[in-house]
Image: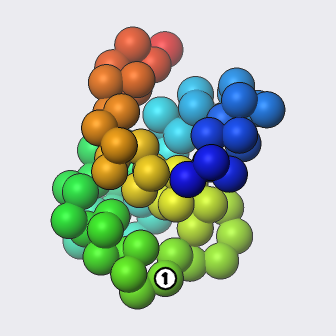
Amino acid sequence: MEDVFEELQSDPKLLLKLAKYRMPFGKYEGRLLVDLPEPYVVWFAGKGFPNGELGRMLAITHEIKINGLEYLFKPLKSL
């Protein structure tokens, strides 16, 4: 978890990017990652996140959701 928060602190634009990042495939294709249902993100965490940027973004989304920090995205969604 600390790695995720350190990453967000070192790159403030990452949070804005995550706020606009959409799921590229599957049942929730086109949905913002931050709007994915928590059980789906937790399932991905158990199965293993994909490689690359999507996996990194899903891992950050997972940490944000399990720590109840979704409220951080409300002001960012309208930017």
Q: Position of residue 5 (x, y in %)?
A: 62, 40
Q: Nearer the viewer, residue 7 or 28?
A: 7
Q: Is residue 10 left or right of residue 44?
A: right
Residue depicted at x 50% and y 45%: 21
Q: Which residue is mark 1?
A: 48
Q: Position of residue 1 (x, y in %)?
A: 55, 53
Residue depicted at x 40% and y 23%: 72
Judged from this view, the residue extending furthest toward the right is: 10
Judged from this view, the residue extending furthest toward the front is: 2
Q: Nearer the viewer, residue 59 or 28?
A: 59
Q: Nearer the viewer, residue 6 or 48?
A: 6
Q: Secondary structure at mark 1?
A: loop
Residue 75: image quadrant is: top left
Residue depicted at x 41% and y 43%: 64
Q: Nearer the viewer, residue 79 or 16?
A: 16
Judged from this view, the residue extending furthest toward the bottom is: 47
Is residue 33 among the parts visible in the rendering? yes
Residue depicted at x 79% and y 32%: 10
